[in-house]
Image (spheres, rainbow, N blue to C red):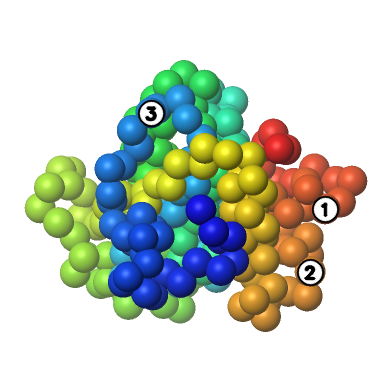
Amino acid sequence: MPSIDKLEFNNPYNESYYTFYSDGPGIVDQYELYFLTLTIVDWVDVFTRAWYKDIIVDSLNHCVKYKGLKIYGWVIMSNHLHLIARSKEGDLSGTLRDFKKFTSKAIIKSIEENPESRKEWMLEKFILSHGSKIRNSKYKLWKRGNCPIHLAKTQWIHQTLNYIHNNLVKARCVFKPEDYPWSSAVDYMTNKKGLVLIECV
């Protein structure tokens, strides 16, 4: 596997393109370590507001404390979440499903009830993207699938950590990875504990 930094995700002849953008084989081994990408429908920039990111942080910590999720790296981008994680309970798919279900309801409720200049536009986007398979819900917040990439070697884990931590630097949002609080870069690059309970590699 080449360095994550050098992957050409927009190249259809690159094997990694299919791994990253399609569901592929999914999460085959529920105990193994995966690089996961959870994406908002239509790439809506939900996470430009801190209070929506805080919902994600609280939910990740809940999954760590009560659902056996072990997180080794994470970052919240404007419209997606990267995770390096495994399940010590052997139910990674189930944990991700419950996480997406809860955060979807919580974020939609926050959009509806709090001051949000983009409220009508955002809710319309989520209604338009709504599928009939979701019962008891008017909206769909997360895209289907988690784009899992199995990290079978320690080398790949470090490459992936480097990739996710430098996302905001490449986007010119921060000068250094550790300047962004909604990321595990704080844990790896400073003496401080980040917002999410993680296990450093």
Q: Which residue is mark 2?
A: 176
Classed neighbour count for the residue bearing mark 3: other residues with Cα under 10 Å, few (<14), some (14–19), many (≥20): some
Give the alpha-carbon distance from disc 1 to disc 3, as whole Å: 30 Å
- Name the kind of residue labelled 3 in the image: Asp
Side of 59 where 194 appears, left or right: right
**Mark 2 or 1 closer to N-term?**
2
Contact between marks 2 and 1 (CB within 8 A): the answer is yes
Judging by the rendered image, the residue that carries numbered circle 3 is 29
Question: Where in the figure is residue 197, as x and y percent of width and height?
Answer: 68, 36
Q: Is residue 180 above or below residue 66?
A: below
Q: Are marks 1 and 3 in contact (CB under 8 Å)?
A: no
Depth order, front residue of 136/27: 27
The residue drawn where x is 31% and y is 72% is 12
Of mark 1 and mark 3, the one earlier in the sequence is 3
Q: Nearer the viewer, mark 2 or mark 3?
A: 3
Could you tell me which quadrant the C terminus lies in? top right
On screen, 43 above or below 101?
A: below
Front-most of residues 129 and 178: 178
Residue at horizontal 19%, vertical 69%? 128
Three-letter code, disc 1: Met
Rendered image quadrant of residue 102: top left
Q: Is residue 201 left or right of residue 99?
A: right
Q: Does the image show residue 166?
A: yes
Picture coordinates of residue 165 (x, y %)? 67, 60
- The amino acid sitting under disc 2 is Lys
Q: What's the mark number on residue 189?
A: 1
